[in-house]
Amino acid sequence: MAKLVILNQGMTGRTFDLIVERTTVGRVDDNTFQIVDGSVSSHHAEILLRGSDIVIKDIGSTNGTFINNDKIEEKILKPGQTLRFGQVELRIDDGSPVTAPPPASTSSSAAPAPAPAAAKKQPIDATMIIPRGVSLTDLEQGGSRLTGFDTNTVFSKKKNKVNIYFIIGAVVVALVITVLIIVLIIKASGSH
């Protein structure tokens, strides 16, 4: 029976037996396999058993699902590969010796044998860094300024044309009313 073993400090050695056909993985407790870590989404991924294959399927997680540092949507996980949900790393423990995947070689020359996993493994810092927002470099550079924007100019008050039209209209109406009153007074005094 295969099981997943968490490799992260603080959770090292925690295992989960893969005994059902569909296992949900996520941060909240309604998942079959709960991983309480801020980098793991509430409902992060599914682990599907298809015959002897273990299929990992990301279900729209925020920080992604990775096999050997390659972001995946759905892929078969093989013994010796590293599975990562957000920042939490896991490996399959199926009782057989773990072998490292063969190195990718682009030339015909023989590549040196990979170092044992224990020799490459460095202590994991408990601090979790999840890249989001603005980088420190962007802050130090102050961002890019818009060209042609002079910050030393004095801003003038924008003229409100509606008020000017209202005042002109009110003066015209007042003049018309005044003329009508004068005309009525002249007619009334001439009819006596």
Image: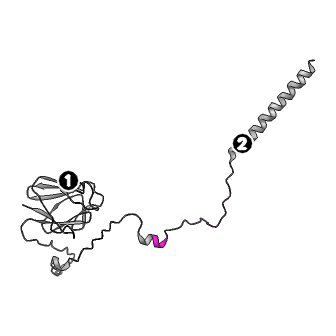
Disc 2 marks which residue?
165
Lateral position of residue 69 relative to residue 96, left or right: right
Rendering quarter of residue 101: bottom left
Lateral position of residue 147 relative to residue 124, left or right: right
Lateral position of residue 176 relative to residue 73, left or right: right
Rendering quarter of residue 168: top right
Q: Secondary structure at mark 1?
A: loop
Magenta stretch: give its range. 139-158
Q: Residue at x 12, y 55 (%)?
A: 49
Given the image, on which type of amino acid does mark 2 rest?
Tyr
Cβ–Cβ below 8 Å for labels 2 and 1?
no
Mark 2 and mark 1: Cα distance apart in space = 67 Å
Could you say which is closer to the camera, residue 125 or residue 186? 125
Disc 1 marks which residue?
31
Could you say which is closer to the camera, residue 30 or residue 40? 30
- Looking at the image, which residue sits at the far top? 192
